[in-house]
Amino acid sequence: MIMMWFLIALASAIIFGISPFLMKYHTYRKRPLAPFLFGLYVSGSAGFLIVAFIQQSWSISFSIVIAGILIGIGSLFGNVLYMKALEHGPASLTSPIVNTNILFIVFMSIIFYGEQLRGVEMAGVLLIFVAIGILPMDPKEKVTIPNRIWYVLSIGATLLFFLRNGGLKVTEEMALSNTSILFFAYLFGIAWSSYMLKKGKQEVTKEEKRISFKWGLFAGLFSFGGMQLYAEALLLGPASIISPLFATHSLLVAVLSILYLKEKLTPFQAVTLALVFIGIILLRI
């Protein structure tokens, strides 16, 4: 029988994956980022606030506010450093390095929270790790690093994403309301993106800002939905399996890019699809 937390974790990856695809599409159209992020965090924070009151799980305390700010820092600036790293090095190296944050969560869950993996589950997790690692690779892409700042940016993004995803595991173990924490995390995103809007380039027209904001609102709904389901899954199941499953959202981004941005399915991506499906099957044997 398939556990409910397993289905929720898969759903979190599928729903959350639409948000980074919309961001990728938005960048592909060369539209301004700040109004997009502002819209994303506005709709996302509204979603968490509504869910918190519907579930009657709304809570506010010093610990929740601080945790929300820390997780918000991990989410927001992790994305910023990742995008900056892509300016100094190839995606074929940047994405695998940044995705190693999942390894930290698995090790943390096993060492500090006593989670255990059966042999077949470990094999499934390892296959997903491998799949995530080779997903962005392109054999035709140059892999040299012209600027050493790439190493600083990539390692920084890795640690910040661990702060976001691993932080939710820690707060769940502390019996804090992750929905409330995510609300404050996204509220932090509103504050930062609002500041960036005010100091943004003057040549960006109001129409471009309006369009970007609307796209951001749409993306924020999927970001909220995916993160909310990820938090729910952590309440019910082991983070050592849930985190790798959540990380497969990058596969959805690749598939949507192939379908809508006319990117070609490479041999690496075909292998990735197979490895992810096999890994998911192994996790539930």
Image (cartoon, rainbow, N blue to C red):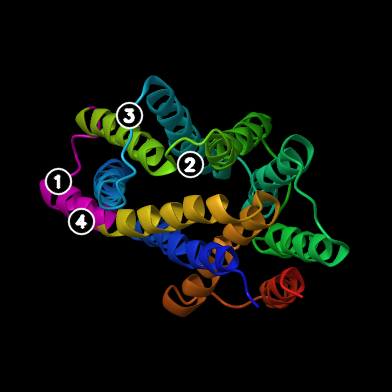
The structure residue drawn at horizontal position 30% and vertical position 35%, both measured from the top left corner, is 187
The structure residue drawn at horizontal position 66% and vertical position 33%, both measured from the top left corner, is 155
Q: Are marks 1 and 4 in contact (CB under 8 Å)?
A: no
Q: What residue type is labelled 3?
A: Ile
Vertically, is 279 above or below 34? below
Residue 15 in the image, given as x and y percentages of width and height: 43, 65
Q: Which amino acid does label 2 sit on?
A: Asn
- Between disc 1 and disc 3, whose residue precedes? 3
Residue 163 in the image, given as x and y percentages of width and height: 57, 34
CA gap between label 4 and label 3 equals 30 Å
Q: What residue type is labelled 4?
A: Lys
* Marks 2, 3: nearer the viewer: 3
Give the structural element (helix, strand or loop) at label 4: helix
- Which residue is tagged 2? 79
- Which residue is tagged 1? 205
CA gap between label 4 and label 2 equals 20 Å
Quarter of the image with the C terminus is: bottom right
